[in-house]
């Protein structure tokens, strides 16, 4: 965006924020809400429109801030068939209901890797390129990392998935989009609930929810304890979650909100196999000891003395691979209505990620405390005589991280070897955002947004290498700063109540995190400080059609141009994943969502994504020994991204009579194959998994309990063996000939594949009082 355009945008917002309110503002606000088309289109029958995140403003106060902005590509996911009447063991089974979302198994427990339009599909554990919020509070740390270990689906009433570049609205790290969780409020719960789920492989989940309103106070509290043995060897876990949302409204124009989340995780990690090992022994069974391991077991070579020299192979059991993590978030918000048309919010949050992760050939220990501050102003009024909503925000966040990395030592559990990396860094982001929604006519709404943000990273990594002759110490310093600007322009046309047509041009940016700057292409601590900001420019054209309350259909086409795309891949078994910049790439595809109650009691649901991603400019340099070769990857597909992703569900709930409350559905989750390497030599196979569900809910009378819900689900009904996760693999060359290694070499590279769960049964009950 040019400086003149920036000034014009700022002047328009200033006029709105200073201008007079509309006399008939209430009617105008309703029009803008209808134009925001949340949840793909108008809500289906029996499904209410999404309330704002956090505690809604009481009647008579100013409208809430822009939480469902006009012109965005947003899918709203409710509780029906995702949380309320099924055993939702991880958030992945819920988010797959949105077009554009791909789900991969993460590292242990209910950890999953979520990508939107493939933008995080190459992540090796944490969530990147996506901003995560809960009840309006940011859960993405200032280094761009989020995890879903702390996310128990039972706590949530709604989830919104924003697709496409979202930096004009959410700032840094929103190149792929954003995910906004909303916990159930006290007035929604209005009592308390207890529930238990149990199933195959020792799965057991006990959870409790309480909520209510008393005068100016409203509170909801969720707590759970979840544990399982896992379907692979050495895959047991237990995790505890507490999630609190509380509000205090002393006056109609002042609201205070408190948010607290605490999650602890203790998980054993199975070994990621090579594709060849997966085909022999997908679930890594019979892999207790390397000396007696079954065929296809994955082993890792650890230095016998923990520092250098001779190595010995160990299995996941012998190495004691695991994670012991804690995440704590405490945040508060003050919301004040300056007048009937203007709302000012200020919020501050503390977020610490503490981890101890001894797995594979290294062990990482660290603490990442961070602070997140946001203040914003929303005003609904008129601009040049037209109804308008203006939004301006100032955001600052900072993280102070310290991580030490050790070699692993063999046997006797998770023993540490020699220190090989000591990293300390501070990262800060400071930026402003502005947005204008202007009702150009009864049918047209225009949107203009802008974000500008500066990021600074200062840090040092000390790497240690050991040999019989002594210890080598290498220091890498980083002192980087980035300035990024992201504009957005959108138009929404609604010719009648059934149709909404939308065009959008938006940009996004993701700066490298400190951890990216200190992992070399060899997969070891070192210097990688040359990384640049990832930027994308996205074009969206879509339509929503809802001719009746029981039918909604959405189709969106997208085309995104990336510059300096940040891509992560594994250099081999047990080594740290490293990040590089691909100079130019393109992502293009189509997203389709549908929900149709086509007959009494019957409902069909569809979420489909076609996603085609290619490098358009990228020359990869590979080295082995004294040889170095360059390979042109232009035209190759970007690894880790399946071209096809589908969820299709058909369900029936008895609408009336003595069996009312009884229902069932069957669904299939389909994912296409995808390449594992930049040279496009090796593919991870696609899959199709079928799940079947039976559920029953009834109101109870004459006693203290109010409602009983029962459900049972068979997952992977046909016992399909499939790849649930596969990390990208680095290509290599022969140190003798300089020729690129073929698919056979990649297929035997360990540290990549997790198999998905075989057939399993999970059932449960929930009792509300």
Image (cartoon, rainbow, N blue to C red):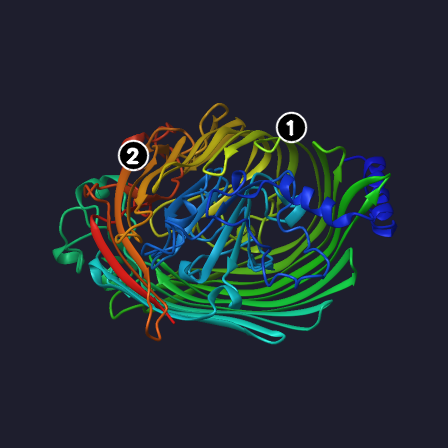
Taking depth in this image into account, of 614 and 442 the one nearest to the observer is 442
One can see residue 257 in this view: yes
**Mark 1 nearby-residue class (10 Å; few <14, some 14–19, many ≥20):** few
Up/down of 661 relative to 325, above or below? above
Q: Position of residue 342 (x, y in %)?
A: 78, 57
Taking depth in this image into account, of 636 and 441 the one nearest to the observer is 441
Q: Where is residue 226 in the image (x, y as percent from the top left)?
A: 33, 66
Q: Which residue is drawn at 48% across and 27% down?
A: 633
Nearer the camera: disc 1 or disc 2: 1
Up/down of 498 relative to 376, above or below? above
Q: Which numbered disc flags the more N-terminal residue, 1 or 2? A: 1
**Mark 2 nearby-residue class (10 Å; few <14, some 14–19, many ≥20):** some
Q: Report the residue marked by disc 2.
A: 685
* Left or right position of 191 against 33: left
Question: Label 2's element?
Answer: loop
C-alpha gap between disc 1 and disc 2: 44 Å
Question: Label 1's element?
Answer: loop
- Assign the N terminus to one quadrant of the image: top right
Q: Residue at x 58, y 57 (%)?
A: 53
Taking depth in this image into account, of 115 and 333 the one nearest to the observer is 333
Q: In which quarter of the image is residue 97?
A: top left
Q: Report the residue marked by disc 1.
A: 495
- Assign the C terminus to one quadrant of the image: bottom left
One can see residue 626 in this view: no
Up/down of 604 relative to 418, above or below? above
The disc label shown at residue 566, or none = none
Q: Where is residue 735 in the image (x, y as percent from the top left)?
A: 36, 35
- Disc 1, disc 2: CB below 8 Å? no
């Amino acid at each position: 965006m040019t400086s003149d355009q920036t000034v014009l945008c700022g002047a328009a917002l200033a006029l709105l924020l200073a201008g007079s309110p509309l006399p008939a503002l209430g009617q105008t606000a309703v029009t803008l809400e209808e134009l925001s088309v949340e949840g793909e289109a108008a809500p289906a029958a029996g499904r209410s429109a999404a309330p704002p995140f956090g505690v809604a403003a009481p009647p008579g106060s100013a409208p809430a801030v822009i939480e469902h902005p006009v012109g965005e590509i947003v899918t709203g996911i409710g509780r029906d068939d995702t949380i309320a009447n099924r055993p939702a063991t991880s958030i992945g089974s819920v988010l797959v209901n949105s077009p554009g979302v791909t789900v991969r198994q993460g590292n242990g427990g209910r950890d999953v890797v979520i990508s939107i339009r493939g933008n995080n599909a190459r992540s090796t554990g944490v969530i990147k390129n996506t901003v995560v919020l809960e009840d309006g509070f940011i859960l993405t740390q200032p280094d761009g990392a989020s995890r879903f270990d702390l996310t128990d689906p039972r706590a949530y009433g709604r989830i919104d998935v924003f697709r496409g570049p979202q930096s004009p609205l959410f700032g840094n790290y929103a190149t792929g989009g954003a995910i906004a969780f909303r916990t159930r409020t006290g007035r929604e719960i209005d009592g308390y609930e207890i529930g238990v789920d149990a199933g195959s492989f020792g799965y057991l989940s006990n959870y409790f929810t309480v909520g209510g309103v008393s005068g100016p106070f409203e509170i909801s509290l969720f707590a759970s304890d979840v544990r399982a043995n896992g379907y692979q060897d050495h895959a047991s876990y237990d995790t505890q979650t507490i999630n609190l949302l509380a509000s205090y409204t002393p006056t109609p124009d002042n609201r205070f909100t408190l948010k607290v989340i605490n999650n602890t995780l203790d998980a054993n990690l199975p070994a990621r196999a090579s594709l060849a090992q997966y085909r022999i022994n997908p679930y890594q069974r019979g892999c207790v000891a390397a000396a007696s391991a079954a065929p296809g077991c994955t082993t890792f070579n650890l230095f016998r003395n923990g520092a250098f020299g001779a190595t010995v192979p160990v299995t996941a059991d012998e190495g004691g691979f695991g994670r012991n993590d804690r995440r704590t978030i405490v945040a508060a918000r003050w919301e004040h209505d300056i007048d009937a048309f203007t709302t000012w919010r200020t919020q501050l949050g503390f977020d610490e990620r503490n981890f101890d992760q001894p797995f594979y050939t290294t062990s990482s220990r660290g603490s990442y405390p961070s602070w997140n501050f946001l203040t914003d102003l929303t005003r609904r009024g008129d601009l040049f005589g037209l109804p308008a909503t203006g939004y301006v925000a100032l955001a600052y966040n900072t993280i102070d991280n310290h991580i030490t990395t050790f070699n692993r030592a063999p046997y006797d559990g998770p023993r540490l070897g020699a220190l090989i990396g000591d990293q300390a860094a501070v990262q800060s982001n400071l930026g402003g955002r502005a947005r204008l929604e202007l009702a150009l006519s009864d049918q047209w709404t225009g949107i203009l947004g802008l974000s500008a943000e500066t990021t600074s990273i200062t840090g040092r990594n000390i790497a240690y290498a050991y040999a019989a002759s002594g210890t080598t110490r290498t220091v890498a310093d980083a002192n980087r700063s980035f300035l990024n600007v992201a504009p957005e322009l959108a138009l929404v046309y609604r010719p009648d109540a059934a149709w909404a047509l939308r065009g959008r041009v938006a940009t996004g940016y993701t700066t490298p995190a400190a951890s990216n700057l200190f992992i070399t292409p060899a997969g070891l601590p070192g210097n990688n400080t040359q990384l640049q900001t990832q930027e994308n420019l996205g074009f969206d054209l879509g339509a929503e059609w809802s001719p009746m309350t029981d039918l909604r259909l959405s189709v969106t086409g997208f085309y995104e141009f990336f510059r300096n795309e940040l891509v992560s891949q594994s250099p081999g078994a047990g080594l740290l994943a490293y990040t590089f910049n691909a100079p130019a790439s393109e992502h293009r595809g189509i997203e389709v969502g549908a929900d149709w109650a086509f007959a009494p009691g019957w409902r069909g649901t569809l979420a489909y994504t076609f996603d085609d991603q290619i490098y358009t400019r990228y020359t990869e340099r590979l080295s082995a020994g004294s040889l170095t070769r360059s390979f042109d990857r232009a035209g190759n597909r970007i690894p880790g991204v399946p071209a096809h992703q589908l969820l299709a569900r058909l369900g029936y709930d008895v609408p009336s009579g003595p069996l009312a409350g009884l229902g069932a559905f069957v669904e299939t989750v389909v994912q296409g194959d995808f390449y594992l390497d930049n040279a496009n030599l090796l593919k991870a196979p696609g899959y199709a998994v079928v799940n079947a569900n039976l559920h029953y809910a009834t109101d109870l009378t004459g006693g203290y309990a109010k409602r009983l819900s029962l459900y049972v689900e068979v997952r992977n009904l046909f016992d399909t063996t499939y790849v649930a996760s596969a990390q990208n693999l680095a290509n290599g060359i022969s140190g003798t000939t300089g020729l690129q290694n073929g698919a056979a070499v990649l297929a035997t590279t360990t540290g990549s594949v997790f198999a998905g769960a075989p057939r399993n049964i999970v059932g449960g009950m929930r009792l509300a009082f």
